[in-house]
Image (spheres, helix red, strand yellow):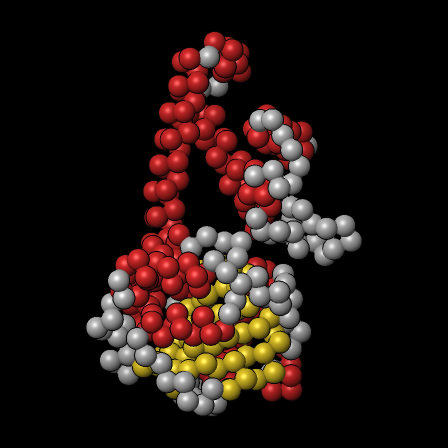
Amino acid sequence: MDKEPAKKLIRETFERSFAKDRFIYFVKNLLNKIDESGSTVLKGSHLPDSYKPHIESLEYVGSYEDSEGSGLDVLIVQLKKETSLDRARAMQRNFISWYLNGGRSGVLRDASLIAFVSPSENEWRFSFVKMDYKFVEDKHGKSKVKEEFTPSRRYSFLVGENENSHTAQFQLLSLLENDEENPALAEIEDLFSIEVVTKEFFEQYRGLFLKVKEALDEQVANNPKIKKDFKTSGVDTVDFTKKLLGQIVFLYFLQKKGWFGVERDAFWGTGPKNFLRRLFKKDIGTYSNFFNDILEPLFYGALAV
């Protein structure tokens, strides 16, 4: 697939509410092929008791095998609680462990690509979980299979209509563009590498830091009042930029938890995940200067106390 159609496919898949057909189409293009025979849905009494409070259903979409014979299953997991998408990742991981260890069919599987979907379907999580199986001896000298998660369990893409797809494009684009070779499981695992994503984040963060600092330097140089304020406060543009960006990142952390804009009498944690953007665009409230009227009172009149 050419680059621009691939980017469009990622945006249409990951910047919208979950849609099964769109998700399957994306996975088919990512892997180049999947076997969709035998697709099933498990719900209710067919799920383990410990997961019934959290999982509405498990749908097996299809399977994929790479050139080395490693098997991957494509799954859709419908969650019962809106807050489970963010707060119950250990439960989600353990549920997939149960599945990969033969919980559905009695057959061990190597890995899975999963769409964890919130009840509203506005947000969902695209995850990869891989199990390593190895033989170990117990204290009696008998061999048994021991399963271990790979480090890739530490990262997945949180997507949906309130999210952008920048990271997904950065990670997934090369695999979508390759129509000739079917990917190995190791390549798919690399797409979910937290180390790669963290490196990209800090490169972007550094660029933003320099941009903000340069803008402040210009303000200080050309505006005597701002220059006096900085001097009186004993703060330079480097320290101010560090603190400002750190405070904004913290606001996004709170926003991800759904703690902003919770409706009266609604469950805590159900606030909109685009609250800050809506605030900035004046969809919520009004202001003359975003920093002076919104951020400064929030930072120093609310969060500081």
Q: Residue furthest left?
A: 180
Q: Report x, y in % for residue 92.
A: 54, 70
Please provide percent x and percent y for residue 302: 67, 33
Residue 16 appears in view? yes
Q: Quadrant of the C terminus?
A: top right
State the residue in front, 48 or 25: 25
Could you tell whether 258 is left or right of 224 in the image? right
Going 24% across and 67% down the picture, which residue do you hit? 178
Q: Is residue 9 left or right of residue 102?
A: left
Q: Residue at x 37, y 85 (%)?
A: 35
Which residue lies most toward the right here? 265
234 vs 2, left or right, is: right
Identify the residue at image location x=39%, y=19%. Answer: 218
The residue sitting at 65% across, 66% down in the picture is 81
Residue 99, horizontal then vertical, whole percent: 49, 81
Position of the N terminus by quadrant:
bottom left
Q: Quadrant of residue 190?
A: bottom left
Instruction: Judge by depth and name the residue closer to the eye, 21 or 207.
Output: 21
Q: Is residue 135 visible?
A: no
123 versus 222 height, above or below: below
